[in-house]
Image (cartoon, coloured by chain):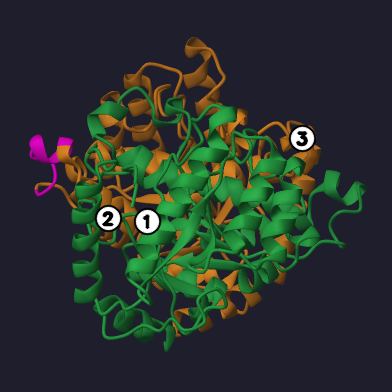
Chain colours: A orange, B green
């Protein structure tokens, strides 16, 4: 597996095959300890967002084929979200989505909030969303870019990485999903599935406020775009999956309340300072549609999640 | 009452006493309809943040005296959060806090996230926080400045006011409170009380993530600032009050879980397009320390909140 580091992960070189093997062994040990029998791997941020347009498609193919081989070597235990060449022309991205759909261990794609460069509400993404919907491939949406540093004020460096990591990531994610909702992505592609990192950013908590602000917006009303759309709760319960990377019962309960316990996943970043710190790996529970045979087993996190779901 | 408009409120002139009287009558009718017997009024954003330094203190005194008279005319029904001259020197702000403490109907102050100009984590605010703590005056923290418009992307204007209103306000608020936490405000002033608008922005949902990011931050660890501080949950349960302006059960339950049902308030903006849309007026429940005699009565919102609290 090739994986760039993210969050609090130490900046290490994961392009070395021996190092990658070590990381995978470490991950499999952690998964085993937590009673996780099936996992979905994905490349960490910033994925291929930084690549020149003319090399992106070939690089994506190489990475996806590498990961496919790795999954095949651990048959029945490992699956993957593929990497897209988002700096390439949209038709090349669509081609890779079509190709990924034919790979037996791929179940979706991982994507940042910049889309093709101007955000996930870009109409130029429509052919890509259409292909993902057609092939029932999940979008795993993960943050990378954060918020402009000015919002943290002139004393931000006194606080280490806390403000961009604790707040920038989930806020970036929430803004991106709200832009998808407002641009009508889930109206045009009603069967599109999206797995949102970090328990949806702040979406479960702010869903009511977003819905209310849409329902009362004079501009949207004038355009007739209030009544004709699917509301935020409908999308949360039918299109959205959330991970459990929220670090507390309060947030986890809200995530379950917003999308339903059967749409929650366990997520973790490997290698990383904390087991449950980020989101490179996703494990389904209760049999999700993109991994129908997945079940939680004896893991502590799964137990706690089940307790909360039964509250 | 002098009140500048905010959020979706129509931009109207509230400086006319007759107009102010009409607004107050409208508010008292709404309060009565919802079974609210006692309210705390405050000036809406942007308060006096825009005033020249040399006129701010006198303007604040005039407004606070006006509001004090208004409360006295509705004895037992109206109380107030005072307005501070935050563009004036800190000692003049402290003087107004001291003066407000002697006014019989004032119970705290309303403040934006800019503090004296560089944020609520500014050490120059310490004498003001000390005076507020000493006189048991609550800080009502409300957003105004939002996030830089660049974060909403190039299609933001297609979505009316939804993105800055639904997301900008709560994210601005959460960043501000996190900066207070990280700068040690609640360690230096352990009895300081703060009422956070819009159910804490996103604080109840992100509290676990903030706490985890602090607990694992290498920079803070090196400075010895992890073990010696009060944690986020301690502050949420002992210093923080939240309003119920979150528009959905999911968020309201998270707010109750984070701070406790006895620290939740009903809040509304008058005049405004929606009854429960913003936060000019705050109503305590279960007898809060700054309004010990306040009780919820028959209001629908209170009933729903009580149902959720008993879950």
In x, y percent, where is residue A188? Answer: 18, 40
- The chain letter for the residue carrying disc 2 is B
Residue found at x 41% / y 37%? A100
Provide the residue span drawn in magenta. A219-227
Residue for badge 1: B280
* Numbered mark located on residue A250 in the image: none
In the rendered image of this protein, does residue A67 appear above or below residue A301? above
Q: Do the residues labelled 1 and 2 touch (CB within 8 Å)?
A: yes
SS at mark 3 in the image: helix
Please give the residue where the numbered disc 2 appears in the rendered image: B270
Q: Residue B84: give x, y in percent of width and height.
A: 55, 46
Which residue is identified by label 3?
A157
Q: Which circle, 3 or 2, is nearer the viewer?
A: 2
* Residue B256 drawn at (x, y percent): 48, 75
Question: Is B55 included in the stretch rendered in magenta?
Answer: no
Q: Mark 3 lies on which chain?
A: A
Asked if badge 1 and badge 3 are on a common chain, one would say: no
Q: Taking A82 as reference, is B31 left or right?
A: left
Location of the C terminus of chain B (image quadrant): bottom left
Say whether marks 3 and 2 touch (CB < 8 Å).
no
Q: Is residue A125 above or below residue B168?
A: above
Q: Residues within 10 Å of mark 3 (few under 14, many from 20)?
A: few
> Residue A267, can we see it?
no
User: For this rendering, which residue is in front, A295 or B111?
Assistant: B111
Q: Is residue A3 left or right of residue B290?
A: right
Q: Is mark 2 on a helix, strand or loop?
A: loop
Q: Dot 1: what SS?
A: loop
């Amino acid at each position: 597996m090739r994986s760039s580091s993210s969050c609090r992960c130490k900046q290490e070189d994961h392009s070395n095959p021996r190092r990658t093997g070590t990381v995978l062994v470490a991950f499999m040990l952690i998964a085993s300890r937590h009673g996780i029998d099936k996992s979905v791997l994905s490349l960490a941020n910033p994925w291929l967002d930084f690549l020149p347009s003319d090399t992106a498609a070939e690089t994506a193919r190489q990475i996806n084929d590498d990961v496919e081989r790795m999954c095949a070597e651990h048959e029945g235990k490992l699956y993957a979200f593929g990497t897209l060449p988002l700096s390439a022309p949209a038709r090349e991205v669509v081609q890779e989505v079509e190709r990924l759909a034919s790979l037996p261990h791929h179940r979706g794609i991982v994507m940042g909030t910049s889309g093709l460069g101007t955000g996930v509400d870009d109409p130029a993404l429509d052919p890509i969303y259409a292909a993902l919907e057609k092939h029932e491939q999940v979008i795993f949406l993960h943050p990378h870019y954060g918020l402009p540093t000015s919002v943290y004020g002139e004393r931000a460096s006194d606080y280490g990485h806390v403000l961009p990591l604790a707040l920038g990531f989930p806020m970036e994610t929430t803004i991106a999903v709200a832009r998808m909702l407002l641009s009508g992505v889930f109206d045009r592609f009603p069967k599109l599935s999206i797995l949102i990192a970090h328990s949806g950013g702040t979406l479960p908590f702010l869903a009511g406020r977003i819905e209310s602000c849409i329902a009362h917006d004079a501009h949207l009303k004038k355009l007739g775009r209030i009544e004709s759309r699917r509301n935020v709760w409908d999308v949360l319960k039918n299109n959205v999956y959330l991970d459990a990377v929220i670090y507390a019962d309060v947030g986890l309960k809200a995530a379950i309340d917003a999308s339903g316990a059967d749409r929650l996943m366990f997520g973790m970043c490997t290698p990383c300072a904390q087991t449950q710190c980020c989101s490179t790996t996703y494990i389904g529970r209760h049999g999700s549609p993109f991994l129908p045979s997945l079940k939680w087993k004896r893991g502590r996190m799964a137990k706690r999640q089940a307790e909360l779901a039964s509250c």
